[in-house]
Amino acid sequence: MVLPVFCFSLAIALGTRYAEATVISTLDDLVDKSLDFVVIGAGAGGGVIANRLTENPDVSVLLIEAGGSNEGVLDVAAPGLDSFLINSAWDWNFTSTPQIALNNRTLAVSRGFILGGTTSINQMVYTRGSSEDYDLWANITDDEGWSWDNLQKYIRKNEKFTPPVDHHNTTGQFDPNVHSFDGIVSVSLQGFPNGIDNRTIRTTSELSEEFPFNLDMNSGFQLGIGWVQATIGDGTRSSSAASYLGPSFISRPNLHVLLNTRVLRVLKTDHQQSDFRSVEFTQDAGVTTHTITASKELIIAAGTIMTPHILMHSGIGDSEELKSLGIQTVHHLPSVGKNLTEQPIVRNKWLANSTDTLETIARNDTLLAEVTEEWERRRMGPIVDPPLSFIGWLRLPENSSIFQQVLDPAAGPNTSHYELIITNGALSHPAPATGNFLTFSTSVSSPTSRGSISLNSSNPLEYPLINFNLFNTSFDRFVVREAYRNTKKFLAAQSWDGYILAPPTNATTDDELDEYINQNAATENHPVGTAAMSSNSAAYGVVDPDLRVKGLVGLRIVDASVFPRLPAAHTQVPVYIVAERAADLIKDFWGICKCNGHT
């Protein structure tokens, strides 16, 4: 299947935000084509890099985005309408290969095809992971700069904690001591209460040993159940497009943004064997191609799926695999596309004795229009929040039978094995014909299965093959079974008396649960690891600890593909953290002042 390329003349829809910005339609619109840096991809990683490098007015950056503008897209801006973005024009609409362990089902893979990347279409959850996740990164890379303590300044630079839109008293819902209030991306607590809030909190008291309350899962200690924090400000999604590429930044004269432009390959510069600072792209589905070269660096931030796709089409990857497709190997780097890691999830829907769930809105077009109008008029009402209400990060008991077969794969004893996501129904499309539901999703937060991204052909406009290889290990399946069983314990608390009418399945045995999992498991859309960083001395990996592609000059990667291990977290915040440090690494390498000064 060919990847989407929209008609350029129609797709550039510039809103008022871009009235004085340097958003360009073609390279001909660039007055000065001498660019210091070219960044591929305007998601979490690319947005940060473009913003931070252009803080210095003497540094010029071209930011290339495959998708269109986020401006004026209601479903992007209103947090509660995020489900309408799946399989939309703003989604790459990838599909996995058949997953052998899931009855050969193919799975939808949602990634953002829009300025802001997946930060413009995700569920906005703000989770950093555990401190042990990052300390493990530091150990893997032999670089203490990736440790939790040393990344704190980058966490603070990224985050701008803001009051929820309803301005309720947030005492006891988060710990202000572990947050920043003057960063870039807005972060907030729930701004519209719902009927399951009190029941959930009471359960953490009633069953405090198994399901303890955690005041703030972003403190570095994540275990327990707590209130969801989300990348929202004033009831509106705070994506990388709305924050790092917001009005005061995107209007910088030294930042140029090229939308609706598909990168095909990165190229050797001036026939130098290891120097890759040129990029080939198209704006008309490959009918014509164009090339531009950065004087300093080319930075790929195309994401876990498209970054290895671009590398391999450029001849950077496993030589035997490339040869089989007729692609000439320019640089043998066999780890490209390998180590694909994803968090499998089962969205368990419990029939609820309630009409106060999102299905009530989803089934009623008039009511949906009313709450949407309320949001548009005063940024209030049920769609000021993502659908998630609470998250739990929990571990298997130390005496679990699975640990007689495998070592504990979590980053440490304070890092979760699984995640519980508690949602007051779903504002889905299409909505279920009848019934109101408590969605209690179970996900493997420290998975052990590994997959790969590979090429389908030598045509860079075709989809890559995405094989997550989900549930390839006994550990991952064991975790999902036990997580589901624990949701039953949670909902058996007195706090839920009379609320649950029916479970999502009557399965009880391992075999029965396995079949339920096989029919219902999906991805949490948190893929990482396909251009993983490793130590300078390691024979494996794609980038070094400074995120430079091993064995090459001028080419760096800044996105979730560089994660050596998947943190026990939703992945947008870890990407922001990586990108903030990457910006400093780049500035240090090139002697760029970390202020609004000069090179």
Image (tube, rainbow, N blue to C red):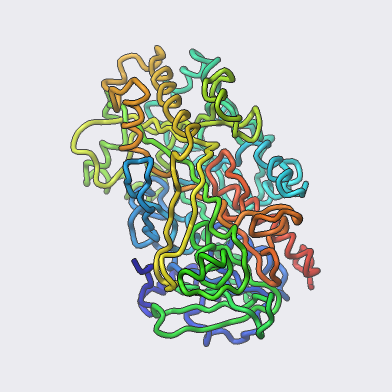
Residue 553 locus on image (x, y percent):
71, 72
Q: Quadrant of residue 162?
A: top right
250 lies left or right of 388: right
Q: Quadrant of residue 523?
A: top left
Please tell me which residue is depicted at 68% across the width and 37% down the height of the picture. 131
**Residue 21 visible in image:** no
Please tell me which residue is depicted at 45% across the width and 26% down the height of the picture. 483
Residue 498 locus on image (x, y percent):
30, 15
503 lies left or right of 588: left
Please tell me which residue is depicted at 63% across the width and 70% down the height of the picture. 331
Question: Is 444 located above or below residue 469 in the figure?
Answer: above
**334, 142: nearer the viewer:** 334
Question: Is 23 located above or below residue 516 in the figure?
Answer: below
**253, 285: nearer the viewer:** 285
Q: Quadrant of residue 557?
A: bottom right
The quadrant of the image that shows the N terminus is: bottom left
Number of disc labels: 0
Residue 99 locus on image (x, y percent):
37, 46
The quadrant of the image that shows the C terminus is: bottom right
Question: Is 96 located above or below residue 502 in the figure?
Answer: below
**83, 247: nearer the viewer:** 83
Please tell me which residue is depicted at 73% across the width and 45% down the height of the picture. 138
**433, 546: nearer the viewer:** 546
**Residue 444 visible in image:** yes
154 lies left or right of 282: right
Residue 160 locus on image (x, y percent):
62, 47
In the rendered image, the residue lying farthest to the left is: 433
